[in-house]
Image: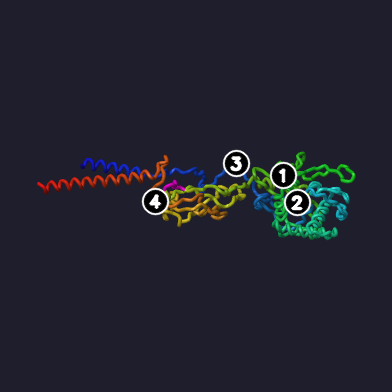
């Protein structure tokens, strides 16, 4: 009987051990991610250039196009005369308010152009599309095209048949409003072409902000890069040729700059040489503005600024939405879970332009929500352990991006899925095993073992009673 009892006990122990096997803890396709605390490191292969010191321009600025970050400036907030670089703002308004394929009739506004102003060669009563008006204004720097654009847009937007001069004044109001929206707060525009007027002025920085806003428009980006165009007069069909004077875009000119993608020249005796330029290299988009450069030096001033920017700066996409920054262990999770949780960056993409020597100094630090941790003390050498339950999208912590102690950006870190809390039922019915072993089998095994134990105890007690009966009998 003792041997029988021992064998049954062993069987029961095996059954109990088998029924208590843990659920597989393997993750289900958790995507890999870099640790948020990993330091960024780069090798700067090219020699860094010192800030430009020999610019002839009275005012200049270099900015990164997408962020608007100023990378270098020389009296960038000084008010100067912009000359024909004004036409960038006129083109922006025309592209935003006009219909490019709309046919416009040239009016008497072209007779208001000064004799020594540059022209696109328009003829009164000529019919021309808005698209070609903008191109004629940018390529050939036509003041007549600028006036025609201004009058047409003013009448269209106001909904009134404004007299010519009233329409030009109305358009000037539109120019100043759009300039302020672009971040140009120290400017005043009184005409659409930039012919000298003492009340018509801007700053290098303001002109860069206007140019940046213009580059957001797809048609402007195309138009500002065109260097030549052959057209015909509407009435006679005679050929008409438009040619840009921008040497940076002319491949046959010694001043050609291979990374230039567009630009607008400007000159009056009062403004001196002005030039707005756009260039792209290695994924970095830059805008330069030089105002009142020495004669013929606007090209070298511009290239010096571009080379400084491309050699010293780099765009770093620091934060990317949906990036998995860490996978944390979870305690007290339900039996059908695998016990780990990925956390991701939930903010929009964020990056900035940095000096190349600063990029290795960028740090990413995580602060976890202490109320969600299983071990509040934790250890600096181990990952924190979360305590279930956790819901999808719940903020688990915060990621801060710093540069030499200065916080540049911060973003919440959120759970990518739900993690349910373990319940009493989980302990009794721990779910299906990796091979699909149903929970009912281990539970039934425990019940069967308990029943067998009861039967054995019953027979033991019965045998004892029988022995006791025989003992009393004899």
Give the residue number, with chain letter if any, for mark 3. 45
Which residue is the site of mark 1? 261
Q: Quick one: SS at disc 2?
A: helix
Vertical position of residue 245 compared to residue 150: above or below:
above
134 within the magenta span: no
Q: In which quarter of the image is the N terminus?
A: top left
| Foreground of the two, 465 or 327 | 465
Residue 299 vs residue 396, the one in the foreground: 396
Mark 2 against mark 3, which lies toward the viewer? 2
Quadrant position of residue 147: bottom right
The residues bearing labels 2 and 4 have C-alpha atoms spaced at a distance of 67 Å
Cα–Cα span, label 3 and label 1: 25 Å
Counting from the top left corner in percent of width and height, residue 319 is at 57, 49
Name the mark nearer the viewer: 3 or 1. Answer: 1
Dominant secondary structure, magenta: loop
Q: Is residue 176 among the parts visible in the rendering?
A: yes
Residue 32, horizontal then vertical, whole percent: 51, 43
* Contact check, label 1 and label 2, Cβ < 8 Å: no
Q: Name the residue under label 2.
A: 95
Magenta stretch encompasses residue 338: yes
- 222 vs 318, left or right, is right
Query: Which range of residues does the magenta coloring cover?
Result: 335-340
To which residue does mark 4 refer? 425
In the image, is 398 to the left or to the right of 200? left
Could you tell me residue 438's position as x and y percent? Answer: 40, 43
**Cα distance between the residues tagged 1 and 4:** 67 Å
Which of the marked residues, 1 or 4, is nearer the chain's N terminus?
Answer: 1
Mark 2 or mark 4: whose residue is earlier in sequence: 2
């Amino acid at each position: 009987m003792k041997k029988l009892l021992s064998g049954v006990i062993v069987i029961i122990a095996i059954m109990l051990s088998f029924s208590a096997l843990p659920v597989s803890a393997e993750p289900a396709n958790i995507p890999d991610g870099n640790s948020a605390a990993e330091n960024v490191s780069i090798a700067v292969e090219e020699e860094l250039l010192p800030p430009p010191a020999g610019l002839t321009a009275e005012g200049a600025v270099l900015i990164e196009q997408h962020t608007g970050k100023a990378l270098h400036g020389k009296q960038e907030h000084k008010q100067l005369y912009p000359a024909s670089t004004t036409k960038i703002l006129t083109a922006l308004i025309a592209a935003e308010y006009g219909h490019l394929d709309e046919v416009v009739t040239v009016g008497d506004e072209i007779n208001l152009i000064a004799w020594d102003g540059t022209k696109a060669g328009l003829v009164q009563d000529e019919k021309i599309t808005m698209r070609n008006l903008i191109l004629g204004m940018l390529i050939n720097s036509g003041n007549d095209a600028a006036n025609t654009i201004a009058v047409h847009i003013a009448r269209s937007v106001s909904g009134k048949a404004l007299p010519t001069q009233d329409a030009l004044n109305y358009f000037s109001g539109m120019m100043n409003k759009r300039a302020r929206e672009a971040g140009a707060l120290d400017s005043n525009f009184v005409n659409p072409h930039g012919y000298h007027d003492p009340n018509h002025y801007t700053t290098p920085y303001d002109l860069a902000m206007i140019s940046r806003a213009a580059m957001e428009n797809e048609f402007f980006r195309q138009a500002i890069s065109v260097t030549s165009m052959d057209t015909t007069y509407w009435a006679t069909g005679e050929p008409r040729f438009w040619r840009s004077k921008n040497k940076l875009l002319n491949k046959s000119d010694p001043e050609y700059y291979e990374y230039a993608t567009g630009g607008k020249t400007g000159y009056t005796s009062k403004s001196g040489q002005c030039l707005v330029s756009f260039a792209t290299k290695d994924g970095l988009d830059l805008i330069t503005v030089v105002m009142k450069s020495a004669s013929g030096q606007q090209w070298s001033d511009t290239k010096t600024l571009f080379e400084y920017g491309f050699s010293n700066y780099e765009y770093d996409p620091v934060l990317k939405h949906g990036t998995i920054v860490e996978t944390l262990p979870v305690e007290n999770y339900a039996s059908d879970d695998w016990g780990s949780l990925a956390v991701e960056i939930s903010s929009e993409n964020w990056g900035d332009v940095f000096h190349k020597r600063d990029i290795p100094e960028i740090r990413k630090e995580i602060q976890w929500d202490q109320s969600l941790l299983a071990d509040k003390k934790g250890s600096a050498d181990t990952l924190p352990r979360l305590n279930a339950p956790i819901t999808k999208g719940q903020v688990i912590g915060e990621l801060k991006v710093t540069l030499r102690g200065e916080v540049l950006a911060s973003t919440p870190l959120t759970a990518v899925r739900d993690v349910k809390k373990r319940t009493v039922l989980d302990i009794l019915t721990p779910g299906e095993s990796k091979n699909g072993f149903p929970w009912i089998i281990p539970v039934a095994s425990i019940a069967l073992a308990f029943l067998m134990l009861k039967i054995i105890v019953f027979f033991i007690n019965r045998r004892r009673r029988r022995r006791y009966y025989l003992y009393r009998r004899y």
